[in-house]
Structure formats: structure tokens, C-alpha cells
Amino acid sequence: MRVRTKICGITRVEDALVAAEAGVDAIGLVFYAKSPRAVSLAQAQKIVAALPPFVTTVGLFVNASRSEINAILQQLPLDVLQFHGDETAAECEGFARPYFRALRMQPGVDIASIAAQYTHAQGILLDAWVPGLHGGTGERFDWTQIPHNLAKPLILAGGLNADNVAQAMQAVQPWAVDVSGGVEASKGIKDADKVRDFLYAVQMKNAQRCDGSL
């Protein structure tokens, strides 16, 4: 199985194009004003318009109202929605878009039970838990705590970078990996070399898995 890639927190056209040229599967656009990686609608429109074919665009929302999300969808052709707050299953649905649900690995929380509530989600993204923050922390969590009975494909996030993503792929066997801070020069500004190095590391690990050497 080929592990897919998503680079989140894209704020500039040039960063999106570097990622696309390096082979990314999806980019994430953050519509959460409190995030240092938040984009305006105008920024997002320029980024999406510049992308070549076959790069999935993901819109990230944190406890946004239905009217806020619909207003963006009316003006921006997002492919997938990512819910990264406290949204219920009902609040994630009804937008005529597939979605995946992000859950933070908070100690003592039954992640598998929560994930099972989102029956129509395409996947479950697991991220590190930091009090008061909704992702993009750069913190890694204990991968051994990931439940084996998740009902949906797993997207692994949290503290990934070019140096540890192959290890993560080997240990977790996720459907996809998601990175933001691990490929940045500063918050919201991607480092082109780090982006390329991250995607190359994933591609090399995928190649090893396909030829049976690992």
C-alpha cells in the first residue's frame, strides 16, 4: 500500500507549487483565524487556481459555523473538509463534500470509540494533544498508543519531518501522513528543501515497501 501525503498550512502559491511538483497528494488550507497558518479566502483562491491537476485541496475548520463553511464553499472549489475542533458527526455532514475528522491523542480518551461515531468520514486523522491548541503544534505523540481497531483509514500527523516519517510509516502503517511545522521555515512559510526532503523520504519508503525489501 502506498502511503499518501498531505502538507497542511499552505499560505502561499509558491509553497503549494513546490509541494505539487515534489509529488504531494493533498494540500491543506487553514480557515481558522487563531492559527498562524490561517488563510484568507482571497489567498486560498489564488492557491487553488494555481494548482496543477490531481492535487487534492483540503479545507481545515475548527468549530466553524455551518454558514461560515458554506460561504467559503460557495466561492472556493475545495475537494475535502477536515474538521479539527469539537464537531459532532452531524456537524461534519451535509456539505456535499467528503470529510475526515481530526482527533487529538488526549490521555485516557477512547479514540477508537470516538472515531466510530463518524460513520461517514473518509478517514480519521490522529494528532498530538496540546491543551488549548488545535493541531500544528509540531509535537509528536506515542505511536504505540494508536488503537488497532480504528474503523476508518488512518492519517498520521503530529511532529513528523523528513527524519522520522519513514520510521512512522514502518511503525504505524498509516493510509497517509500529514505534515505542517516539520517542513516550515517559519509558521505558515514552507521551506522548499524541507518539503522536497519530506516527500522524497515518503516516496523512498513507499518504494521499499512495494519491492518487498521492508
Image: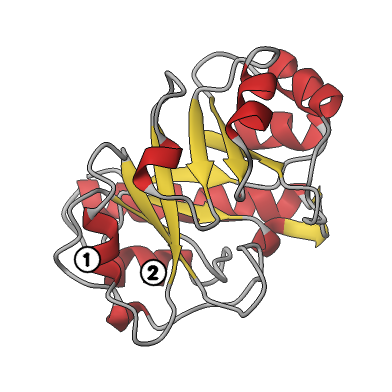
Q: Is residue 120 depicted above or below 162 in this figure?
A: above
Q: Nearer the viewer's eye, disc 1 or disc 2? A: 1
Q: Where is residue 76 in the image (x, y as percent from the top left)?
A: 67, 17
Residue 210 visible to an observer of this rendering: yes
> Who is closer to the viewer here, 2 or 83?
83
The image shows residue 28 at horizontal and vertical percentages of 61, 40
Label 1, on which residue?
113
User: Which of the 4 quarters of the picture holds residue 174?
Assistant: bottom left
Secondary structure of the residue carrying tag 2 is helix
Badge 2 density bin: few <14, some 14–19, many ≥20, Cα 10 Å: some
In this view, 117 is above or below 157: above
What label does residue 168 carry, if any?
2
Within the image, what quadrant is residue 65 found in?
top right
Q: What's under tag 1, amino acid-wise? A: Ser
| Upstream in sequence: badge 1 or badge 2 | 1
105, above or below 22, in the image: below
> Where does residue 90 sit, x and y in percent of width and height?
37, 39
